[in-house]
Amino acid sequence: MRLRVLRAGADAVLVETATGEDTEALHAELLRRREAGELAGVTEIVPAARTVLVCGLADPRAFGAEVAGWDVPPVPRGRGAAVEIAVRFDGPDLAEVAGLWGVPPREVAAIVTATPFRVAFCGFAPGFGYLTGLPDHLHVPRRAEPRTAVPAGSVALAGPYAGVYPRSSPGGWQVIGTTGAALWDAAREPAALLSPGTEVRFTEVAR
């Protein structure tokens, strides 16, 4: 794994990776090592698309040299407990996604529900998780013209990611369905249903 380690303040480093898959693997390894008690003092581990921020390091320089030599295994998928999100596959872009995949619209639900997803990182809006798991040939482009308002609960695809809009907002992802799941609830602990590293499975609800 090719890494670039940058200082980020007095007690943190930003670790850059070459691919999204490497970022997920590094994030999972950091979590595993912290749980095993190997990262004493580390306060935050925050993944993004191609980076992981590690905070609370007593010696950032030494950690940077150490992490560059780690043997980081790929992330196993579909082996742990998963958050299930029930979906009605009734989105306005369902037929377009089916055409891009070369399958009947009905088959989109079967493919998505059979795919083990994982939250790679969060962002865009509180509660929004970028889910990976679709193979390369099922990646789809963003819409040529973004919508000014995508309803809360919209299940959508863009590039290598799937995601669920936690609230109404502008967006250019391909909307394939809807869910009633509350992705963000300030009265809940934790407020976010999804967090980085969470396994996710979509299930189908009859229309």
Image: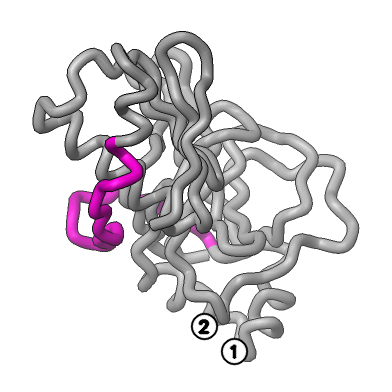
Q: Is residue 145 left or right of residue 85?
A: right
Number of other residues with Cα within 10 Å of mark 2, as a class: few under 14, some 14 to 19, many 20 or more: few
User: Which amino acid type is marked by label 2?
Assistant: Glu
Farthest residue, direction top: 10
Q: From mark 2 to mark 1, how far is it between C-alphas?
A: 6 Å
Q: Is residue 72 above or below residue 100?
A: above
Quarter of the image with the N terminus in it: bottom left
Q: Residue 103 carries which label?
A: 1
Q: Which residue is drawn at 61% across and 41% down?
A: 165
Task: Give residue 2's position: percent from left, percent from top.
Answer: 44, 54
SS under mark 1:
loop
Q: Is residue 42 above or below residue 34?
A: above
Q: Is residue 202 above or below residue 7?
A: below
Magenta segment, principal secondary structure? loop
Q: Residue at x 51, y 58 (%)?
A: 19
Q: Nearer the viewer, residue 189 or 180?
A: 189
Q: Is 1 one of the magenta-colored residues?
A: no
- The magenta region covers 66-88
Where residue 116 sits, quadrant-wise, is bottom left
Q: Nearer the viewer, residue 70 or 161?
A: 70
Where residue 63 sits, quadrant-wise, is top left
Q: Name the residue under label 2.
A: 107
Residue 20 in sight in this render: yes
Task: Give residue 188's position: percent from left, percent from top.
Answer: 37, 18
Q: In this view, does 45 lie to the left or right of 182?
A: left
Task: Give residue 91's position: percent from left, percent from top.
Answer: 66, 62
User: Which amino acid type is marked by label 1?
Assistant: Val
Q: Do the residues labelled 2 and 1 touch (CB within 8 Å)?
A: yes
